[in-house]
Amino acid sequence: MHKVFSRFNGPCLDRVKDSYNAFTGLAKFHRPSGALFKQSAVKHTAPDLPEMPPCSFTPEEYKDMSKERMMEIRRQYCNPMTMKVTYYKKPVYIHQGHMQWLWDVDGRRYLDLFAGVATVSVGHCHPKVTEAAEKQLRKLWHTTNIYVYSPLHEYTEKLAATLPDPLKVIYLTNSGSEANDLAMLMARLHTGNFDVITLSEYETGLTSIWLFSSQTMCPDVFAGPWGGSNCRDSPVQTIRDCSCPQGSCTANDKYIGQLNEVFATSVASRIAAFFAEPIMGVGGAVQYPKNFLKDTYKLVRERGGVCIADEVQTGFGRTGSHFWGFQGHDVIPDMVTMAKGIANGFPMGAVVTTPEIAASFAKGVHFNTFGGNPVACAIASSVLDTMEEDGTQQISHDVGTYLLTELAKMRDKYEIIGDVRGKGLQIGVEMVKDKASRKPLPPAAMSEIFEDTKDMGVLIGKGGVYGQTFRIKPPMCITRDDADFFLAVFNQALHNYMEDHH
């Protein structure tokens, strides 16, 4: 751990000392200067800023399109949602990436703690994965499953080995949305039933989910109607009181009761499927009561449905304790969908299911031109090898647990942090007006903290129904020093906000 130092004395130094309080020693600090500091959206006295951990990689000089021209094209030719989802009042213009680092077109370096929405698993342009891609590109770009080629079979054998029996039949796709659509179709054909149940706040990417599904209440033990201080599988529990008798969970019983209401009033007596992420992604890293998925799977199967685990964000060791998120709930689903980290950002997805469900689907014809593309398979195969060699699951566990524990200390310090939750490097920090009401911190306030964090060199995400949850889902190669840098930056951003508004 580094000691804190400053190059100046007086009231400003006192302010920095007060700001960091219990967090001193997290990172070195330096005096702010240059464009990075000048662009800050928050107007406050200049404190010392954390010193970014060193990086030996040197990015190429940017010589492509101007920022103004990119935005002009973005507005004129890109679909309207592209502008809607553009982060920051002053967007970040990304040029190059290496492992946990990104550089913008001006050469400014950022610690990437959002990984292209939990997609870059082993690191931006990881040398080993890049080498595998280049090697395959020189050999064969594309062919389809009508021919037999090595990369497809090498990869599917490796992927199957990571999953428990009977999850051994693999369908390769090009994205998580495609994988979820395919899983829904397979469930309906296999069961002969139609209704699909999801959790409210669940973003699946299913093209027809809003037309053809029912939702049960999201079992959110922090913001929901029921919750306590021992509900979830996380190093950090909620601040809510718990009066449950030993060995029971009233919150779980209540949320399962809501599911039974859906069964009784909103769907047919026989259903097709239940979709859920082991930990919510876009929904804000919401975690359920410990036995919720196990109890839900039992009820779904009693009604003829299949259980589908959406591992698009939680898979491939991101939760730290297990390679697959569902394993942390002590369940085995009937289908698993995956994407994002599967190929470190290269477009790819998959559905893995049982021989029985695959046999039902084989009664028809299924063909995917690009699913199982040789380049995609070579990259994904290298990603699995790299995960094992680099120990990314252990990194997720160790660094993630450290981050959660330290963020929980900030929650105790700041009234506007309502909840810290997650496992491994799937982390959510829910911001509130105050802890008593648990009402979401308004968007303008979220934006202020978000922008300030970016201006100090860290990129994080947002999620939740009201965009009230900061999402921390970095490449699984970050270090303890990186974590300390983020903690110091985030703490300073919170301190700046509190000082400016209270």
Image (spheres, grey):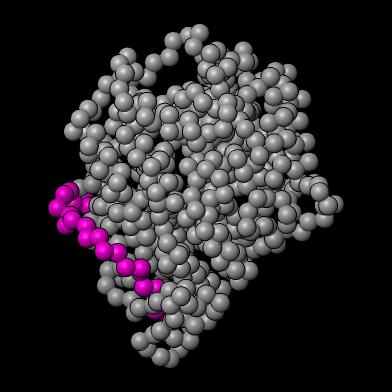
Q: Quadrant of residue 279?
A: top right
Q: Is residue 214 something that shows in the picture?
A: yes
Left or right of residue 41, residue 282 in this image:
right
Q: Is most of the magenta stretch helix, strand or loop?
A: loop
Name above or below for residue 65 compared with residue 178.
Answer: below
What residue sits 44% from the left and 24% below the top? 171
The magenta stretch spans residue 54: yes
| Residue drawn where x is 81% and y is 48% of the image | 247
Q: Is residue 195 left or right of residue 129?
A: right
Which region shows up in magenta? 46-68
Residue extending farthest to the left is 63
Q: Quadrant of residue 165?
A: top right
Q: How many marks?
A: 0
Quarter that holds the C terminus? bottom right
Outermost top residue: 363
Q: Nearer the viewer, residue 294 or 62?
A: 294
Q: Residue at x 62, y 20 (%)?
A: 272
Evaluate whether residue 114 shows in this view: no
Left or right of residue 361: residue 32: left
| Whole-percent x, y for residue 401 in the image | 55, 59
Percent coordinates x, y for residue 97 in the rendering: 29, 52
Magenta span includes 50: yes
Q: Position of residue 410 (x, y in %)?
A: 57, 68
